[in-house]
Amino acid sequence: MERLPVTEKDRELIEIGLRVLKDNFDDGIYNHTVGCALLCRNGNIYKGVNCDGIHGSCAEYITVGIAISSGEREFDTIVAVHDKALNCVIPPCGNCRQMLYEYCPDVKVIVNDENGQLIKVKARDLLPLPGSPWSAKKLCIKNTLCSGADGATNAMRHTFNTMTANGVCRALTIGISLRCWSLNPFRRDCHGSAF
Ligand SMILES: [Zn+2]
């Protein structure tokens, strides 16, 4: 695993994440307790906080979603933060590691190393032996995901059935199927308007 040094720009990114958390902190109803900042390769920076709920999303998910919604596709560095965490940095959870691997495996993630020092590592290095979603995506496209809501539903159902038949666990299969759905506008070879 390649370990990259943390730069002054990375520390500024941490500060940006802390600021968005401070501005939106809530430890009551909505539980906004983690901030995130994402630097794109073009220099643009996006920020977000986690959204809690029955199906809550981590700050990394929210922030990547905001960046993608703004047209970004190339990501450089990401960090999740909390002011009480070691070096104010929180390592991504397993779910986020999978998401980062799928969207941007080469994005650099600021984390703490074994000695408590800040380093950067590529997202792909945070998820050894990852599951591959690519075959599922192909299935979604193949099953006219772009043709509308029914196409998406059918594609998800087909993907679920296919992967369950192949021994993939139920939760993982559902996750991958939904990822296909959400990835639809992300793909440049899709031209559907239903999503
Ligand atoms: Zn997470």
Image (spheres, rainbow, N blue to C red):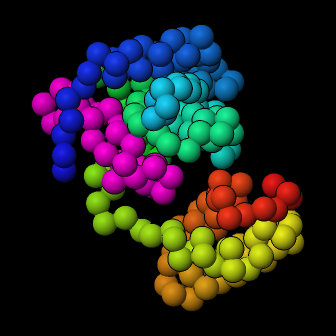
Q: Is residue 191 left or right of residue 50?
A: right
Q: Position of residue 51 (x, y in %)?
A: 64, 33
**Does residue 157 appear to the left or right of 85 in the view shown?**
right
Q: Is residue 56 visible?
A: no
Between residues 64 and 171, which one lies in front from this camera angle? Answer: 64
Viewer-proximal residue among 56 and 7: 7
Q: Does residue 95 lie above or below 63 as drawn?
A: below
Left or right, 163 with reference to 3: right
- Is residue 167 a member of the stretch shown in magenta? no
- In the image, taking residue 182 as reference, residue 73 lies left or right, namely left
Quadrant for residue 93, please give it.
top left
Dividing the picture into quadrants, the one containing residue 48 is top right
Percent coordinates x, y for residue 64 in the rendering: 56, 39
Q: Residue at x 77, y 76 (%)?
A: 144
Residue at image point 81% right, 62% down:
192
Q: In the image, is residue 119 part of the stretch drawn in magenta?
A: yes
Residue 60, x across and y down, in percent: 51, 37
Q: Is residue 142 above or below residue 59?
A: below
Residue 155 vertical position relative to residue 124 in the rendered view, above or below: below
Range shown magenta: 97-124
Q: Quadrant of the C terminus?
A: bottom right
Residue at the (32%, 32%) spot, across then down: 110
Asked whether 18 or 187 is in front, the reply is 187
Is 88 placed above or below 188 here?
A: above
Residue farthest left in this picture = 115
Q: How many marks?
A: 0
Q: Quadrant of residue 140?
A: bottom right
